[in-house]
Amino acid sequence: MAQDEQYYDLIRVFKKNQDKPMKIFFKMYKGSYKDLFLALVVFCIKHSPVWVIPIVTANIITIITEPATHNFNEVWINVIIGAVFVIQNLFTNVIYARFFSNATRNVEAVIRGALVRKLQQLSISYHKDMQMGKIQSKVLRDVESVVTFANQLFAGVIPIILNTAVALTVTITRSLVVTAFFLLTIPVSVVLVALFRKPMRLKNANYRHDVERMSTKLTDMVEMIPITRAHALENVEIDKSDEQLDNVKKRGWELDLLNAKFGAASWVTMQMFQLLCLLFTCWMAFRGDIDVGDVYLFQQYFSNIMNQMLSLVNIYPILTKGLESIDSIGEILWAKDVEDYSGKRTLDKLEGNFKFENVDFAYADSPHHVLNKFNFEIKAGQCVAFVGESGAGKSTIINMIIGFCRPTGGKLYIDGIDSEEINMKSFREHIAVVSQSAILFSGTVRDNITYGLTHYTDEELWKAIDGANLRDVIENLPNGVDTMIGEHGDKLSGGQRQRITIARALIRNPKVIILDEATSALDNTSEKLVQSAIRNAAEGRTMLVVAHRLSTIKDADVIAFIKDGVCTEMGTFEELVDKKGDFYNMQK
């Protein structure tokens, strides 16, 4: 639970600090400040040779150029001091990596965990609008970019600040004039970053959007390969993909070119400053204002400062990309389209009674009402079929019962309780849904049937298998219930996949089973087997069916004909045929 709270804290951070990526970034590390502090302390120790060796070298140069005033033992002392500072890096570098990696990898896991939890909260309509390729890009590529951003910030920017501070401090103790010369480089670096900051942010954003579109296109292309191959459309898909890849290439080229211009301008500027520093310090030594060894010391420290400034401008594109990735992740974490259907009332049991009372429903982006003052009652244990033309509102009724959408007017009662008051998660634990598309995942038959269950017996498993008319299929598989079925169950037929989803429903022993066009894509033989499985599943349960085929709904207790969001007819199959109304006309 403490870990979950960490994930939800991060989601709240994103919501509260929208459009403030740097603030979000630092708050990500809230639980890792101790590790970061220790990493910083150890970094100063491990990195100290960079600061000490120039001093040691300058001292040695001064000693050997002025032998009359120095003893050679001073050289040994300086060498030993330098060696001690160098050797300690063997141990402190590992300790630093341990603290720093612990912090960054923890944040990486927390970001991905927060994304997973938010994706589970977002509404079904959000997932229908958001392409899978975009989600994959955000969870994989953008999170990795944030980790790279952290590495560059803590292992790049902070050392730059420390190195510059130490170099300036030592220089101040030796010569205020040279220090003033050093300080001239800082505003130059600031100006360079300011000139390139806005175009870099824009180019990174454009590149990221094109990569997301490419990821979406490639995901769709892979899923469409059987259709593409069957209709000889390979070249069409290749042309579409090439167009998207060209866009990514163009955006990447523009970004690389801008980064190259930025890097070249920075490098040339810094090298010119370093040559000027060498000339200036040599002139001071020639005049006797500083020691000869100080020429080397100042040159090394100025070179250090130049390298730090150059490193800063070189990693700036990476930092910009990281900030853009934080915004990209935020598109999910601060999304407001959450399934707000979590009333406080928990259902410990479900009878299976449903009542629609003057229910209206319209999608947020449409003035058209899918349901209009819809009134209907379903009693526990009934098998109720909803029929009608496409777009009449049948699936909306089912989705409203499941809780995927809420009434925009009127009330839906579940076992006499207003659905707004019910915790829908507790309700869904008592229902099972079999959709038109048999949704399976890579794994075994057993994995797919028992999905989400931690405790079940073999007896319960085989009872569900028999109820779904699946035993003969499993007995012919090479490894029985432990046979791998391929991605999306591609090694099985459509009817076999659908019967696995029915077995998945039965093993949960639900009080309500919902079938949404469960047989529409099957051949006649498969349909008969699935229908037999459906009849087995209906025993002692409330069964809600959306279907067009007469064979699927013929045995229903009640058939409701839905037209323009209202129920125009209801009754048994025979009663509706004798009535010769909408239902009868649809069958002709």
Image: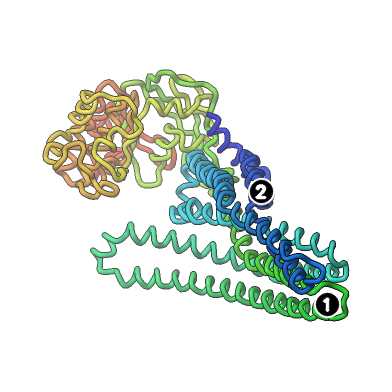
* Closer-to-camera residue (489/150): 150
The residue positioned 84% from the left and 81% from the top of the image is 286
Distance between mark 2 and mark 1 Cα atoms: 37 Å
Q: What's under tag 1, amino acid-wise?
A: Ala
Q: Which residue is mark 1?
A: 285
* Residue 230 placement (x, y as % from top left): 23, 63
* Closer-to-camera residue (156/419): 156
Q: Quadrant of the C terminus?
A: top left
The residue positioned 65% from the left and 41% from the top of the image is 33
* Residue 429 placement (x, y as % from top left): 40, 27
Q: Quadrant of residue 501?
A: top left
Q: Which residue is mark 2?
A: 40
The residue positioned 47% from the left and 62% from the top of the image is 213
- Sort mark 2 into few (<14), some (14-19) or many (20+) by Cα contacts within 10 Å: some
- Sort mark 1 into few (<14), some (14-19) or many (20+) by Cα contacts within 10 Å: some
Q: How is the image coloured?
A: rainbow
Q: Quadrant of residue 322?
A: bottom right
Q: What's under tag 2, amino acid-wise?
A: Leu
User: Does residue 570 appear anywhere in the picture?
Assistant: no
* Residue 321 placement (x, y as % from top left): 59, 61
* Closer-to-camera residue (126/88): 88
